[in-house]
Amino acid sequence: MSMLAGATLLVGTLFGTGTPSAQAADVPAEFGTDWHDPVTAAPPVERPHTSSCQITLADARFRDFTPYRGAYTPPEGCGDRWSKVVLRLDGKVKGRQYDRLGYLHVGGVEVLRTSTPEPSPDGIEWHVEKDVTRYSDTFRSAQDVEMLIGNVVDDTYTGVIDVHVTLTFYAGRPAAPAPDRVLTLTGTPDGTTLTTPRNSERIVAEVYATGSGGGCEEFWYLTVADPASYSCKADHGPYREVQIKVDGQIAGIAAPFPNVWTGGWSNPFLWYVVPAPRAFDVRPVEYDLTPFAGLLNDGRPHRVEVSVVGVPAGQSGWSAPVNVLVWRDAHRARVTGGVTAVKATDLANSSTYTPGAENRVDTEAGHRLTVSGYLDTSHGRVTTTVTRTLANTSAHRWTDGENTDGLDAAWTDDETVTVGGHGPARSTHTRRTYTVDGVVTLGADKRLRTVLTLGDRASVVVREGGRRTAWSRLDDTYRGDAAYTADVPRDQRHAVGTSTERYRLIGSDGCHDRSLTTVQGVLTQDRSRC
């Protein structure tokens, strides 16, 4: 592991009181040429205590925008049903390089979307783990593999990105039934279409929606509409909403996560050790399309479209690949049904511009959608209702020349899925909250400072017959404060920075509570407590 010499790690006891068990680390006055390898406070993937087998999915070195292409073959002697499948990416890079975005496809199915840390001159290593059991249907047969982390290597940007990706298969039955089919959309001259099995009884679409590419849509939450005098423009301001439609009819809405990559907010010194939440494992937006299963089960292709509301017409910068997960009725060859209701409010989106010594745009926006449908399954008629309510508030303030630029914003995505049949009704209520509160200042002395807090929170409550049967609460909070001298060579930047992350996940399945602290690239605290 790449670490500054002489650093002493401050560690609490796992599941203990959290009392420090070591002395404070030796911290340099400024960032040097090496720092601790990237680490996050998120929990590792839990692995079953069963027999397992492992295969290599990809070995690649990314220097440009040429994809790695390979072949996947199911592991021998490991069966075709697994309790868990875990993907692990191990990466390394050294020299100088920007943050880069990447994807991994198996049989056309996107199984990982990721970004990379920015390296130290002496080199770093990092890894990403992900539970990919939901893609088991894809892993049961031979598939093409494609991976790309688009990169540029030249005399200035010297970092070649090396990655090694494995899949580990664990014997046994999964805790929850994995999807029977994993589908992707088919491109046609009229758009993209989906054909589902005729006995589908649950359908979930997942969309890996990311604003990226280095343009304004990478920082979509900062865009403003005319007449505001800001460098990043959008016709209707900063509100973005990821919509999915079936045959032209709105079927789902969602708030995109405000991803911050490891060069974000004008200050890579914030992210050298602890990345922003979700930066290395970009999670998809999910839509329960079961209310539309009766329509989709007719054996014909249906047009499915994903769009990002708020993106200026003709402007690129968003990627939104789609996987569709299908659970089938094992006792009926065809399941019929219908859509009974699609009710959407008008999309509210108001931005108020107040010019002055500190310009300001205040935004309030939101949307609500309810969709319902029924299916006549082998176990009777089942109705599904999905209600989703989105809300966004933000205050964006900046000075002329944008030498001070700040944002205080929050997004809520509140979803309830209710399933009713012959037994007690089951409801799952999920409330997601994302927050960004930060400011970048550039002084007359060219000293650039970024102070930033990011929040990723969610609560889930499952009820059957009105009685709570499962619950969880997530709070992943990042705080950073870093400064450096801009427009000078690296050795003259005199960079300093601190960062912390606390990841708390508690609920009926257990507890994880881990805190990390860094100073000038040294990991000074790693504490677990529950």
Image (cartoon, rainbow, N blue to C red):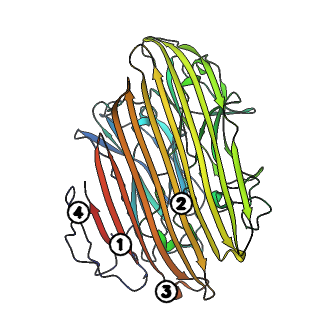
**Which residue is nearer to you in this view: 103 or 292?**
292
Please tell me which residue is depicted at 30% across the width and 82% down the height of the picture: 26
Question: Vertical placement of 353 versus 202: above or below?
Answer: below
Q: CA distance from mark 2 to mark 4?
A: 28 Å
In the image, which is nearer the foreground, mark 4 or mark 3? 4
Question: Vertical placement of 475 versus 34: above or below?
Answer: above
Name the quadrant containing residue 139.
Answer: top left
**Which residue is nearer to you in this view: 184 or 238?**
238
Circle nearer the N terminus (4, 3): 4
Q: In terms of secondary structure, where does tag 2 sit?
A: strand
Q: In terms of secondary structure, where does tag 3 sit?
A: loop
Q: Position of residue 173 (x, y in %)?
A: 30, 30
Name the quadrant containing residue 340.
Answer: top right
Q: Position of residue 9 (x, y in %)?
A: 27, 72
Q: Which mark is residue 18?
A: 4
Q: Residues within 10 Å of mark 4 (few under 14, many from 20)?
A: some
Q: CA distance from mark 4 to mark 3?
A: 33 Å
Is residue 153 visible in the rendered image? The answer is: yes
Circle nearer the N terminus (1, 2): 1
Residue 56 lies left or right of residue 223; in this view the side is: left
Q: In terms of secondary structure, where does tag 1 sit?
A: loop
Q: Which residue is mark 1?
A: 2
In the image, which is nearer the foreground, mark 2 or mark 3? 2
Circle nearer the N terminus (2, 4): 4
Residue 88 lies left or right of residue 95; in this view the side is: left
In the image, which is nearer the foreground, mark 4 or mark 1? 4
Q: CA distance from mark 3 to mark 1?
A: 21 Å
Q: In terms of secondary structure, where does tag 4 sit?
A: loop
Name the quadrant containing residue 388.
Answer: top right
Q: The N terminus appears in which quarter of the rendering?
A: bottom left
Residue 395 lies left or right of residue 49; in this view the side is: right
Is residue 310 visible in the rendered image? The answer is: no
